[in-house]
Image: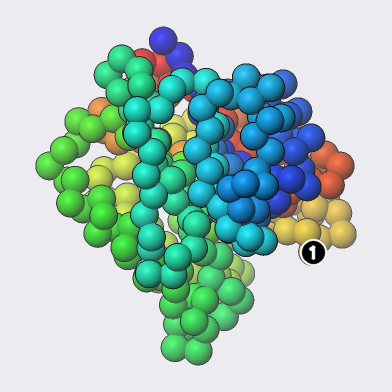
Amino acid sequence: MDIKIATWNINSVRLRINLVERLIAEESPDVLCLQEIKCINDAFPLKALKAAGYEHIAVHGQKGYHGVATLSRIPFKKVDSMNFCEKGDCRHLATDLDMPGGMRVHNFYVPAGGDEPDPEINPKFAHKLAFVREMTRLYDGHRTKSQNRMVLVGDLNIAPLEHDVWSHKQLLKVVSHTPVEVALMNELIASHDWVDVMRRFVPDNEKLYSWWSYRAKDWLAADRGRRLDHIWVTPALADTPVSMTVRKDARGWERASDHAPVVATLRL
């Protein structure tokens, strides 16, 4: 069977519900993971998304900030979330899909980290580093369970490779591509031998972005992007990805998010 999984930092689901509906109509993902939904659970547009075919919806939201949601056509066996850094922020959901062989989908929204890449003077950056370290410790405990079928998606707010940013040299001191962040992400990847699905389809020496700043007058012409959104799988699923696309065109939709959806299909 094929399962299509999409991830998108929507930057307010209520403001952009029409864009979510458009993506669903065009891509028809089996599982859609949203980040930065910016609403409490009771304000999430359940009715519209159930009408679009998603009977199984897990929401972990808070008023005005952060928040993640996982929509699925496949029933959930279990839903849980982790409270990272004891902040109480709604930044993670884990859903176990009720399907042959099972699959756990982790949906993450990692802190952006502010503007100053110094944890001594920027508590937002310190929080980001601590958050990624906690993620690593969580998965390090599963090191011996390499056959677990897990997918990790979301806005991880780190562009780890040289060609994940428009200028490696100019962004080395810019939050999201600093050496300390990249090193921590590499430790996280090694903690469970995560497989980078996006780079299975686009070689490391080619540019690959999923985010373009609102600050650019003409984001498309400038094309100064970063790959902040990711889809990873565990070794047990390493041979299953058959396609991947970044819907760059969605960045140009009216009142768009600054992130583009990333869509991958796994053949199980």
Q: Is residue 181 left or right of 72 when viewed as pictured?
A: left
- Residue receiving disc 1: 215
Q: Position of residue 172 (x, y in %)?
A: 53, 70
Q: Residue at x 69, y 52 (%)?
A: 11
Residue 72 % position (x, y): 52, 26
User: Which residue is drawn at the image coordinates 31% and 63% (left, top)?
Assistant: 134
When asked about the image quadrant of residue 245, the answer is: top right
In the image, 80: left or right of 221?
Answer: left
Picture residue at 79% right of the left edge, 64% below the top: 215
Is residue 1 depicted above or below 208 in this figure?
A: above
Packing grade of label 1 (10 A; few <14, some 14-19, many >=20) is few
Q: Is residue 183 visible?
A: no
Quadrant containing the C terminus in the rendered view: top left
252 over 74 or under it: above or below? below
Badge 1 marks a residue whose secondary structure is loop
Tell me where residue 133 appears, x and y as whole percent. 32, 65
The outermost residue toward the left is: 144
The foreground one among 193 and 30 is 30
